[in-house]
Image (tube, rainbow, N blue to C red):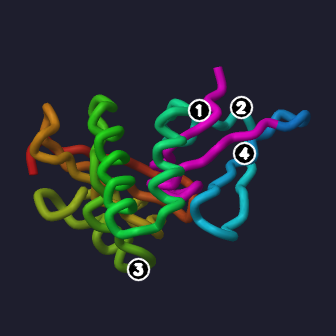
């Protein structure tokens, strides 16, 4: 079943963005972010949706987030972010927070650093890395870990997870 509303955790769609999905006759989904102004609406194939890191949202949750974002006060935007964090906590083994992101040559350098200060990706991966993310769990999650995600532009290259912080 294809969701009608999603929370993206995928850099190809922008992390933490909320989308309403509309399907078309050609088997594609138009990803509409009604909260980000004129940012465009990416289109992905229905078959490829499973390859994206997204969390389905209920229509009720989507409506609640829409209400927070439409008011645009600091308190409402904080409430929206708090709701997103609560949603992320319900997903097993999902890091709740992207702690740091490195880009370009800095990403490639960081990707090669050995644990415990980096992921220690193989040179073939590290050299191709154009974006490196460090994701962490929060203290109230059942399992503590750090996860490094290496990307070459919009293509995932590797993920490495370490127990603890």
| Residue 97 spot, x, y in % from top left | 28, 54
Q: Which mark is residue 47?
A: 2
- Residue drawn 11% across the image and 58% down it: 116
Are the residues tagged 2 and 3 within 8 Å (C-beta)? no
The front one of 118 and 86 is 86
The residue singled out by tag 4 in the image is 44
Q: CA distance from mark 3 to mark 4?
A: 29 Å
N-terminal-most mark, 1 or 4: 4
Q: Which mark is residue 105?
A: 3
Residue at the bottom extreme?
105
Circle 1 SS class:
helix
- Residue drawn 34% across the image and 46% down it: 83
| Residue 78 spot, x, y in % from top left | 32, 60
Q: Is residue 41 left or right of residue 16?
A: right
Which tag is nearer the camera, tag 3 or tag 1? 1
Q: CA distance from mark 3 to mark 1?
A: 30 Å
N-terminal-most mark, 3 or 4: 4
Crowding near pointer 4: few (<14 within 10 Å), some, many (20+)?
some
Are the residues tagged 1 and 2 within 8 Å (C-beta)? yes
- On screen, 84 above or below 41? above
Q: Is residue 95 left or right of residue 132?
A: left
- Residue drawn 41% across the image and 79% down it: 105
The front one of 16 and 52 is 16
The residue singled out by tag 1 in the image is 50
N-terminal-most mark, 3 or 1: 1
Residue at the right extreme?
25
Instruction: Magenta stretch: give its range.
Output: 1-23
- Residue drawn 16% across the image and 47% down it: 138
- On screen, 117 above or below 159? below
């Amino acid at each position: 079943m294809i969701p009608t509303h999603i929370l993206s955790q995928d850099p190809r769609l922008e992390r933490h963005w909320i989308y309403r999905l509309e399907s078309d006759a050609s088997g594609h989904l138009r990803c509409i972010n009604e909260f980000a102004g004129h940012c465009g609406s990416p289109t992905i194939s229905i078959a490829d949706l499973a390859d994206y890191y997204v969390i389905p949202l209920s229509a009720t949750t989507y409506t609640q987030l829409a209400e927070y974002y439409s008011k645009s006060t600091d308190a409402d935007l904080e409430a929206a972010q708090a709701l997103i964090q609560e949603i992320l906590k319900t997903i097993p083994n999902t890091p709740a927070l992207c702690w740091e992101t490195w880009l370009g040559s800095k990403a490639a350098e960081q990707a090669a650093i050995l644990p415990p200060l980096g992921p220690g990706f193989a040179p073939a991966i590290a050299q191709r890395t154009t974006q490196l993310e460090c994701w962490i769990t929060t203290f109230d999650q059942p399992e503590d870990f750090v996860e490094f995600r290496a990307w070459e532009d919009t293509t995932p290259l590797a993920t490495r997870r370490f127990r603890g912080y």
